[in-house]
């Protein structure tokens, strides 16, 4: 029995082992790696559409404007500042006539306040006393108003100091029937009016003492951005404003493309002396009207009764803006080596033959030619406005013909030299003598 049990046990073990082996063999499978993932290429999405080009800068000729033009008798000392509620209009074009005598100073040619912004016509005048200096008008954008100090004379050694920010200045009232204009559009600080033909209200930041005439040859502006920077020898400058400038003979006018009417950037060096800057050809010619009266009016004084003003005259722009980066003939007027600072134009005492300070340009244009010849600085100045306007065009003949200032104008042609005539005379005498000798020889024969 034990033998049978042992055999049965061995059989069961063997059968179990065989079954397990069979199951193991039957359950063995070969593992195949999965196929690689299928890559499907998808085209990238189209790029977003390009932004539309900026709209072109449109410029319309300035509408005719009514301008009151007067001669102003400037103060002989610094007047008190006033505050005006709106910006002065863009500059007008007024080319100075030749300097009538060496001591003359070009005064005027900018906007002044007389119950409204009126044009102070430019003219040559002697200083009221020896060694007095001319101080250009002061415009400042402060709290949305214009702080204004008119052009005036300063004694020897005078240095202009702008009104401190702490000074309280009351806005002056406009004259009867005057419609206020736009407030100053531009940075806070010192400025000059915009170039001729510009959008009203725009201002051009500039150093203290900059003559407004420096922007005459600049293109009109339609947006904020144009500025005047000094080419300086000595300056005091902070990060935002030029606070004082001395020994400046030239300034640079810079404007980005988005600010000019032509949509192009602009940069040009301009003389810092008013009579030289005003003589440069303008891009847009808006002529300054000639005052109806040659008698100057006193400068505005707060609290004084208003001065009777002449009726306004209508002025029209006579040229479209030139699409150029630099103004034409910008180097036609080069400042002299002894050019003074823009805020002071030093002068000497007037000599004999000087015309009165209040002599209008019409009479000064008839100054002796000998005195004009001594003025080396202004030999290239254009002819007077009266002579130019008499030709039916407010520009000078030289500007119309494209010639440099001083050429192609009456009186600019020199007389022909007499050498040729002398030689002709000598040749004539020689022929006559030869003829007489032949006659005598024939008589002898």
Image (cartoon, rainbow, N blue to C red):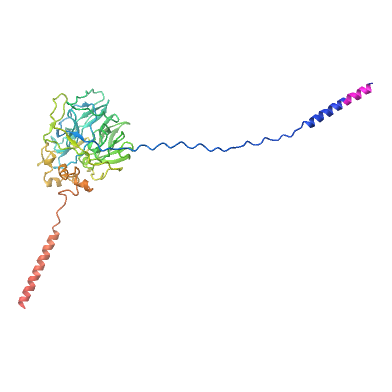
| Residue 366 quadrant | top left
Between residue 130 and residue 54, name the one nearer to us: 54
Location of residue 239 by image quarter: top left
Q: Residue at x 9, y 70 (%)?
A: 434
Magenta-drawn stretch contains 200: no
Name the one closer to the observer, 374 or 18: 18
Name the dominant secondary structure of the magenta segment: helix
Task: Report the span colored magenta.
Answer: 2-11
Q: Would you say residue 111 is visible in this rendering? A: yes
332 sits to left or right of 10: left
Tell whether position 7 is magenta: yes
Quadrant holding the C terminus:
bottom left
Number of numbered discs overlaid on the protein picture:
0
Percent across and percent down for residue 13 are: 86, 25
* Quadrant of the snapshot with the N terminus: top right
Residue 141, image x, y percentages: 26, 28
**Visible residue check, residue 247:** no
Relative to the observer, which residue lies in front, 287 or 423?
287
Question: Outermost residue toward the top?
Answer: 1
Q: Position of residue 419 (x, y in %)?
A: 14, 59
Q: Quadrant of residue 437?
A: bottom left
- Establish if 179 lies above or below 373: above
Q: Position of residue 402 (x, y in %)?
A: 23, 48
Residue at 27% across, 26% down: 144
Which of the two residues, 51 or 434, is positioned nearer the viewer here? 51
């Amino acid at each position: 029995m034990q033998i049978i049990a042992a055999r049965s046990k061995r059989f069961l073990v063997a059968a179990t082992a065989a079954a397990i082996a069979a199951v193991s063999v039957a359950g063995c499978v070969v593992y195949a790696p999965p196929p690689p993932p299928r890559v499907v290429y998808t085209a990238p999405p189209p790029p977003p559409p390009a932004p539309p080009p900026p709209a072109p800068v449109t410029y319309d000729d300035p509408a005719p404007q009514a301008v009151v033009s007067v001669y102003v008798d400037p103060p002989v000392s610094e007047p008190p500042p006033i505050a005006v509620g709106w910006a002065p209009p863009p500059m007008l074009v007024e080319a100075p006539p030749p300097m009538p005598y060496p001591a003359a100073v070009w005064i005027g040619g900018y906007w002044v306040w007389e119950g409204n912004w009126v044009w102070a016509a430019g003219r040559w005048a002697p200083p009221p006393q020896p060694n007095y200096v001319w101080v250009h008008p002061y415009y400042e954008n402060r709290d949305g108003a214009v702080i204004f100090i008119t052009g005036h004379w300063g004694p020897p050694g005078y240095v202009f100091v702008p009104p401190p920010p702490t000074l309280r200045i009351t806005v002056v009232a406009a004259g009867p029937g005057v419609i206020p204009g736009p407030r100053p559009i531009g940075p806070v600080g010192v400025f000059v009016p915009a170039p001729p033909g510009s959008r009203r209200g725009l201002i051009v930041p500039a150093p203290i003492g900059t003559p407004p005439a420096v922007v005459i040859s600049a293109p009109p502006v339609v947006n904020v951005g144009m500025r005047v920077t000094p080419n300086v020898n000595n300056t005091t400058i902070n990060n935002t404003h030029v606070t004082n400038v001395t020994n400046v003979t030239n300034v640079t006018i810079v404007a980005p493309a988005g600010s000019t009417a032509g949509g192009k950037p602009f940069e040009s060096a301009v003389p810092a002396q008013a009579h030289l800057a005003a003589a440069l050809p303008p891009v847009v010619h808006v002529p300054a009207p000639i005052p109806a009266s040659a008698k100057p009016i006193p400068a505005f004084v707060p609290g004084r009764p208003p001065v009777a003003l002449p009726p306004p005259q209508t002025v029209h722009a006579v040229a479209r803006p030139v699409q150029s980066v630099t103004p034409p003939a910008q180097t036609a007027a080069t400042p002299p080596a002894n050019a003074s600072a823009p805020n002071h134009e030093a002068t000497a005492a007037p000599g004999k033959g000087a015309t009165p300070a209040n002599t209008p340009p019409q009479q000064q244009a008839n100054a002796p030619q000998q005195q004009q010849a001594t003025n080396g600085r202004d030999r290239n100045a254009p002819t007077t406005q009266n002579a130019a306007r008499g030709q039916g065009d407010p520009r000078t003949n030289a500007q119309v013909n494209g010639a440099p200032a001083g050429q192609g104008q009456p009186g600019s042609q020199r007389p022909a030299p007499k050498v040729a005539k002398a030689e002709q005379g000598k040749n004539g005498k020689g022929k006559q003598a030869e003829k007489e000798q032949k006659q005598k020889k024939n008589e002898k024969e």
